[in-house]
Amino acid sequence: MRPPFGIYLHVPFCTVRCGYCDFNTYTATELGPVGGAKGASVATFVDAAIGELDLAHATLPDAPPVSTVFVGGGTPTLLPPEDLVRFLAAVRDRWGLADDVEVTTEANPDSVTEESLRVLADGGFTRVSIGMQSAVPQVLATLDRTHDPANVARALAAARAAGLAVSLDLIYGTPGESLEQWRTSLETALALEPDHLSAYALTVEDGTKMAARVRRGELPMPTGDDEADKYELADELLAGAGYGWYEISNWARTPTDRCRHNEAYWRSHDWWGIGPGAHSHVDGARWWNRKHPATWAKGLADGHPEAEREELTPEQRSDEAILLGVRLREGLPTDLLTADGRQAVAGLVADGLVDGRAAIGGRVVLTRRGRLLADTVVHRLIASGRA
């Protein structure tokens, strides 16, 4: 049997580039005149993306009905909602959709309205992931986020009225953010009672505006202890409100509220990525598209939007299964480890990084402390088998 099959669409457009952002996104100013190229502009993007769906279908005509569709970015909701619905219809026309299909779009709080969300819901979308990031104006300003914090509640209410499930995305560890400011963001988010919540530690990437400000001494870098304190506070407050963690950075009210598309990544299922810079994974092969919208559009017109690909070796697949499986609440079956890797589990239990009862039952499940040191756990599990 083939694993579940998903589709990812990368929409590379943003109105403003946030200072911390290292994603493959572009403002109209950054695109310049190439923004008029077919596929490299908001007006023509979905037509080009549907063309890439045709290439995908020609390669995988017998893929199972699509289980999950995720539209990310960038700011996907800068596109007209009718275009997003048209893309979803094109997916349905080529492979069909599973009866319980999950269809998500990311959105900024200021980029959706009651009407646009209703169009999405009526067109088959089931879920919206809103980029809240913080409830504190000072923190949002440091991140160069331009939305009004009050619009998060408005957007969530509009999504609920349309019948969509809602996830809120938060970022912790912004330079200068205090623990109490982070608590304010968490409590504000919980008061809105979303179905799902993600909390990611900010990474200051080289080449970003924020990295330059840190280098000049304008912004302080958060310490590892500060980020650990904020993660522990998030887990404590979310658990107290009835949210269960199911992946290191993700919590859901119930198991059915989990993001199944992201679970597909962590479980190494198959997905096809559409759009500039989008990554795909099918049958152990990975490839990724050309990054810039103009070069992607040109490559697509020539029938070759792909930039590079790689075939994973059995050892790479094994390492990846450990790297990703350890992140999940269900943990990693110990029979996926080498004999030396299984012996390393006892030491991880003794160090308080892995749950002892789960280990006796044949699974590697991280404790809260283990979630903070997940990279260490993975290294010890893999390195033991390479010694």
Image (spheres, grey):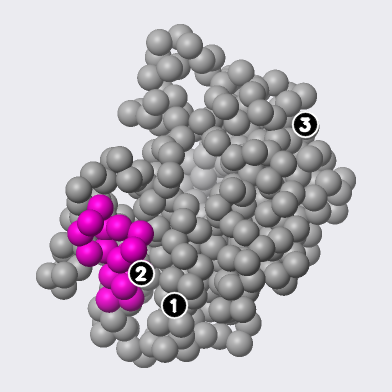
Amino acid at the residue labelled 3: Arg
Magenta residue span:
35-51
For the C terminus, the image quarter is top left
- Residue 302 placement, left or right of 357: left
Residue 206, given in percent of the width and then of the height, sits at 36, 28
Mark 1 to mark 3 CA distance (whole Å): 40 Å
Q: Is residue 40 magenta?
A: yes
Are the residues flagged by discs 2 and 1 in contact, CB closer than 8 Å? yes
The residue under the point 51% across, 45% down is 378
Image quadrant in which you'd find residue 113? bottom right
- Residue 383 placement, left or right of 172: left
Q: Is residue 376 above or below residue 273?
A: above
Amino acid at the residue labelled 1: Arg
Image quadrant in which you'd find residue 331? bottom right
The residue that disc 1 covers is 86
The residue that disc 3 covers is 183
Local secondary structure at mark 2: helix
Crowding around mark 2 (Cα neighbors within 10 Å: few <14, some 14 to 19, many 20+) is: many
Which circle's residue, 2 or 1, is located before the other in the chain?
Answer: 2
Residue 305, given in percent of the width and then of the height, sits at 21, 65
Amino acid at the residue labelled 2: Val
Which residue extends farthest left? 302
Q: Note whether residue 232 is visible.
A: no
The residue that disc 2 covers is 46
Which circle's residue, 1 or 3, is located before the other in the chain?
Answer: 1
